[in-house]
Image: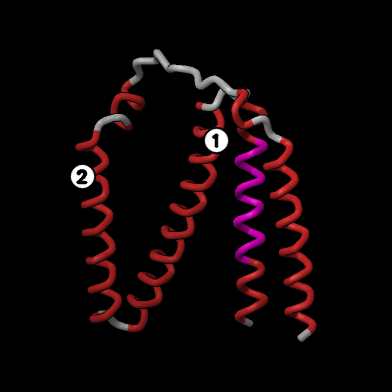
Amino acid sequence: MSYLVGVSAVMAVFLVGVVAFLASRAWKGYAPESSTDGSLLRSLTGNQLVWVLSFLLVVVAVAASVVVFVSGTAGQQAIVSAVLVGVGALLLVGYVGYGTFTSSRARGHTSAVAAMLSAWALGALLLFAITASLLLA
């Protein structure tokens, strides 16, 4: 029962921090900047076909990994499960970190503020992982 009290206290502090942060921001006071950079990477990320093909590639890779996991030997299963967990964690951390950084930059924040918000979001993700580990252990 002491785990639940500790986890509840940590989540309560986290919730108070989130509410305080959201209340302190002037959300209507920003002006998004339009990017005129014509780099290849920016043009690829704006192309819908690139996103669809990337998604299909990820689906095929995950399906092939699942087939190897189900029908492979114990060694292959261990390697595939470690790779799937690692890639999944990397994608989640990249999505949260990079997504927070780019969305805050698009809202007109400086790179330092965007990096701080990205680190804060990744810290929140780590806090959720620790909370889940405490609750499920």
Q: Judge left or right: residue 75 versus residue 7.
A: left
Q: Which residue is more in the foreground, 41 or 103?
A: 103
Q: Earlier in the sequence, mark 2 or mark 1?
A: 2
Residue at (74, 71) in percent of width and height = 8
Q: Which residue is more in the foreground, 19 or 54?
A: 19
| Magenta-span inclusion, residue 122 | yes
Q: Gap between marks 2 and 1, in whole Å?
A: 24 Å
Q: Quadrant of residue 46?
A: top left
Residue 113 percent coordinates (x, y): 66, 30
Crowdedness of circle 2 by 10 Å Cα count: few (<14), some, many (20+)? few
Give the amino acid type for the residue marked by disc 2 in the picture.
Leu
Q: Quadrant of residue 58?
A: bottom left
**The furthest residue to the bottom:** 1
Residue 110 percent coordinates (x, y): 63, 23
Q: Which residue is mark 1?
A: 101
Residue at (59, 23) in percent of width and height = 30
Q: Judge left or right: residue 126 versus residue 49.
A: right
Q: Which residue is more in the foreground, 52 or 31?
A: 31
Residue at (76, 86) in percent of width and height = 1
Q: Which residues are magenta?
A: 116-129
Q: Which residue is mark 2?
A: 53
107 is higher (above) or lower (below) than 15: above
Q: Quadrant of residue 2?
A: bottom right
Give the amino acid type for the residue marked by disc 1 in the picture.
Phe
Residue at (66, 45) in percent of width and height = 120
What secondary structure is the magenta-colored segment mainly?
A: helix
Residue 22 percent coordinates (x, y): 67, 42
| Magenta-span inclusion, residue 126 | yes
Q: Which residue is more in the foreground, 11 or 75?
A: 11
53 is higher (above) or lower (below) than 41: below
**Element under disc 2:** helix
